[in-house]
Image: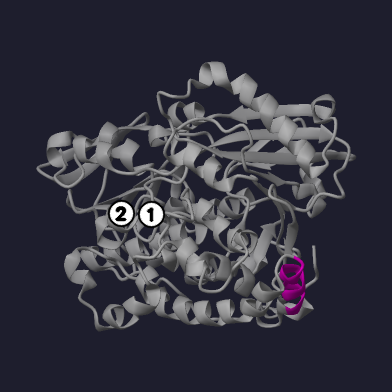
Amino acid sequence: MSATKQVVIIGAGPGGLAGAMLLAAAGYRVKVLERRDRAGGRTSAIEADGFRFDLGPTFFLYPRVLEAIYRAAGRELRGEVDLVRLDPQYHLMFGAGGELKATGDVARMQQAIAALSPHDAAQFPRFLAENRVKMDQFRPILESPFLGWKSLISPHLARILPNLRPFHSLDDELRRYFDDPRVRLAMTFQSKYLGMSPFQCPSLFSILSFIEYEYGVFHPIGGCAAVTESMAGIARELGVEIRLDDEVEAIEFRGRRAVGVRARSGYHPRDALVINADFARAMTRLVPDHLRRRWTDRKIARKRFSCSTFMLYLGIEGRCDDLAHHTIYLAGDYLRNLDEIENRHVLSADPSFYVQNACATDPGLAPRGCSTLYVLLPVTHQHPNVDWASEAPRFRRLALQQLGKLGIENVERRIRFEHMITPADWDHQYQLHLGATFNLAHTLRQMLHLRPRNRFEDLESVYLVGGGTHPGSGLPVIFESARITARLIGQELGIPVAVDGPVVPSRELVRDILVPELVEVA
């Protein structure tokens, strides 16, 4: 089928690229306008002096959604990207004492948990079994648009709601299984993928840790940026025009209908517009306030936004062979650390942090004999309490000191390359509202139809993909948002969009998912 429908996508992040692949494969003419000099958004790379780091996401989870998108585009993900399943998935170190090397091998995981709590070890299979049911029940919700309150009137949703226990927190949910607070933290810290505390995050997100154990934690060779680089290449092969260094300056409207966009390169008309930029920043910068009813500037200012992150990308001399691919240190007073981030908006003296030592799996990311260390500390989003212009040097020193808790010594003297990103940088350089790296918080008041909708409710022929819309943040659900949005565009413009393809199990798919015990450990 030859189509003349033109779709313009603002932003070449993972959601925008996934949408471009699906729409182009269906026959649409697709143009992607990207402000930065490379595709991928925050799922791109920082490269310098022979070192390569992921800018943002480093965990690659639940590849099934992206596999479906690749199939719809006539490709196979595992033929394009080399995915290595990690075992252990990550190493948790508790400031309160103890450690846990998480693995998808249930027997070994029970042994690891037993070192902390024999009672809790016996509960782990029940946790997996019950969350397997929850995941199956919740999957149709993740895959469906919620375009208004009427979307909630569903026999399926009414039937599963009691099992989702929506008014319980994630920590409340985990108390049904585990007594030891360290074990509960091991199964709830994943709420930080949403930028939230497990004591505030809704209970249904227990599926996050379940997904890791059921389907694995993967490292794409070359980093997660290798995935978006592959997506951009396939999109171009399908005829998508990706214009880099081409910031959108204005959206032109006829009434509430977006008729085109003005960018550095000129005017671009469209039949449908997809916004893949940060939601709050795009709205307040590109859409006049009077055109927005539910999402005025005033209402956006009242919404809850996620935490931010302080980042160090360190290219260091020497190897860190005793350090796992992913290591997470959970502060001794974790509740205080969370309170300082979410309520008091101050910097912690003993912050939790995460370190990726990607060269443990992928040595090509650094020059021979060197390593890359990606260091992330969750911190408050932009707030008057913290002036990053003055605080950044002190907090950098603290971050380097924290690395000593993982046995990484003499880091300062070994640094050959360094790049730092503060919440102020996320805000001003990367155009994230308040520097909130996980977008709108995933509270009950900001989920499903109460989140900005995939077919954006305030404007006509404007669609959203990414963490600011349904289903939410994190690569798998961002990819799902692209599937939902592409399907909605197909319905409006009359050219259906396939969001899946025939399942052709590859040897790697059988090895890594269907027969996990045969996986080569990293």
Q: Does the magenta stretch include residue 379?
A: no
Q: Is the residue 436 above or below the residue 226 in the image? A: above
The amino acid type of the residue labelled 1 equals His
Q: State if disc 1 and disc 2 touch (CB < 8 Å).
A: yes
Compute the Cα span from label 2 to label 1: 6 Å
Dot 2, how many residues are within 10 Å of its Cα: few (below 14), some (14-19), or many (20+)?
A: some
The magenta stretch spans which residues? Answer: 107-115
The residue tagged 2 is 446
Q: Main secondary structure of the magenta part?
A: helix
Identify the image quadrant of the N terminus.
bottom left
Residue at 38% across, 67% down: 26
Instruction: Name the foreground residue: 337 vs 103.
Output: 337
Q: What element carries label 2?
A: helix
The residue tagged 1 is 442
In the image: residue 299, left or right of residue 55: left
Q: Which numbered dot is residue 461?
A: none
Q: Which residue lies furthest to the left in this view?
A: 255
